[in-house]
Image (cartoon, rainbow, N blue to C red):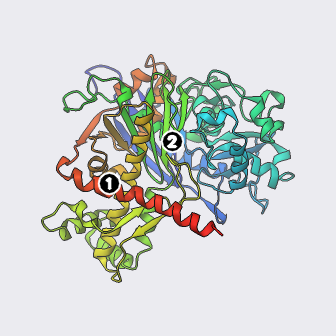
Amino acid sequence: MPGGNEPRSYYVGMDVGTGSVRAALVDQRGTLLAFADQPINQWEPQFNHHEQSSEDIWAACCVVSKKVVQGVNLHQIRGLGFDATCSLVVLDKQFRPLPVNHEGDSRRNIIMWLDHRAVSQVHRINETKHSVLQYVGGVMSVEMQAPKLLWLKENLRETCWDKAGHFFDLPDFLSWKATGVTARSLCSLVCKWTYSAEKGWDDSFWKMVGLEDLVTDNYSKIGNQVLPPGASLGSGLTPEAAKDLGLPPGIAVAASLIDAHAGGLGVIGADVKGHGLACEGQPVTSRLAVICGTSSCHMGISKNPIFVPGVWGPYFSAMVPGFWLNEGGQSVTGKLIDHMVQGHAAFPELQAKATARGQSVYAYLNSHLDLIKKAQPVGFLTVDLHVWPDFHGNRSPLADLTLKGMVTGLKLSQDLDDLAILYLATVQAIAFGTRLIIEAMESAGHSISTLFLCGGLSKNPLFVQMHADITGLPVVLSKEVESVLVGAAVLGACASGDFASVQEAMAKMSKVGKVVFPRHEDKRYYDKKYQVFLKLVEHQKEYAAIMKGD
């Protein structure tokens, strides 16, 4: 039992990622006591169209929730917090699913965050140069909600747009499903929908982009009651949702967060005393949380708004109440590593060897790299193999959807050594992308001394070491690997009233596990690789210009 006779309080954190729903039972000290996950369906009816089902996702939430509270005294469960990807959920006026596809399949009522169908719409929105765009780094991303809404209006007018009663960001859909309250989280609306924490919605923006119909009824379809993350919703968990989730009715349910922001919340407030870090005793603004999974998000906070070209934000109170958030990002990271490794001719051999050893393919690759590096540091194996990682365009800091991936230094051999070195070069390219984002943030006014990593890729020691070596900054890993779930539980803890503020809950519930320091002796090598990295994109733009020329 924590602290002698202190009664133990529990919170449930629920995280809806790209491919699965995960839940955890967490106590008031941030210790993860139970974990469960459940896969969810995805559809790709055509290239760049990615869809999911809100009913399928809710059913998965119910499965994992019941699993994590098995055998627990339900009276000790005090709160529930949700986070999810920033996918777009469409419901009719009776809250029934509507199709977001040409097939008219209403089960598939979610346009996923990584869906890139709205390219022409986002291009037109950016051409307006409207003032709200300065809060998204000057250029809106195709992954945000306004272009997707415009796509629905222009392409599915009768089957979807005209019938729609509610457009939810997925995290807000989940909190509505749990409480019956349609209030939105400041996090979703500010980060993905152009809402301003100070001024609210900007009528002129929606009218200028051709979505004037959303302004009617005081924005009821996209949200007119907005709460900060962690605020308690309505009367808590409804009896119906309580039965679905296997939780006590009436427990506090928090206004939600986007998944990456929950990861930021779960790591950025940790007490770092005694680890010899520059950020000890410094304000939390010297920390950058990097949430790395399918894609990566780089979360930095500041006391005053900082405008960083090509980096989203500044968003007020979107992650930590009272602070401005800047959010850099890389559209594909985990997905890119999988793509490079699985597409290689030596992948079947790798799979067989890893399985025989009872290892994941990445653990096997890491040990194989140690084997072939001989006396040199492992990173030096890529002296003549360089990767530019924007296979799905660049989110930050170049905000250029048209960029493609590049690999230079390929040979005729395709054995396991080649695969391992290509994997290493890809991991390094992602870390160089992080360095580029940090440089953009620092030149705009941020001052960053420490990285806090979480998410699936932070479990890969090579990925972590390369981020330390290439950025030259120490990397802090959480004691609880599932930081996103801790962040979701922090929300539930706040909503329950057990902590006075998000900051207090954050400090008490996030703990440092391990610190990885950069190998400064390799700095000169990585500085040279970084020069090549920057040349790659410069050359790519030159090639495009040549091909466009007369």
Instruction: Classify 183 as above or below 143.
Output: above
Instruction: Classify 136 as above or below 54.
Output: above
Q: Secondary structure at mark 1?
A: helix
Residue 512 position, x and y percent, is 28, 35
The residue carrying pointer 2 sits among few (fewer than 14), some (14 to 19) or many (20 or more) residues within 10 Å by Cα, namely many
Give the farthest residue toward the left. Answer: 375
Q: Secondary structure at mark 2?
A: helix
Q: Is residue 224 visible?
A: yes
Among the two numbered marks 1 and 2 on one chain, the one whose residue lies closer to the N terminus? 2
Label 1 – label 2 distance at C-alpha:
21 Å
Residue 216 position, x and y percent, is 84, 31
Amino acid type, label 2:
Asp
The answer to which image quadrant residue 453 occupies is top left
Q: Residue at x 64, y 66 (%)?
A: 47
Residue 329 appears left or right of 216: left
Label 1 vs label 2, nearer the camera: 1
The answer to which image quadrant residue 312 occupies is top right
Observer-nearest of 164 and 526: 526
Observer-nearest of 537 and 164: 537
Residue 190 appears left or right of 498: right
Q: Which residue is mark 1?
A: 463
Amino acid type, label 1:
Phe
Residue 152 position, x and y percent, is 77, 50
Identify the disc placed on residue 528: none
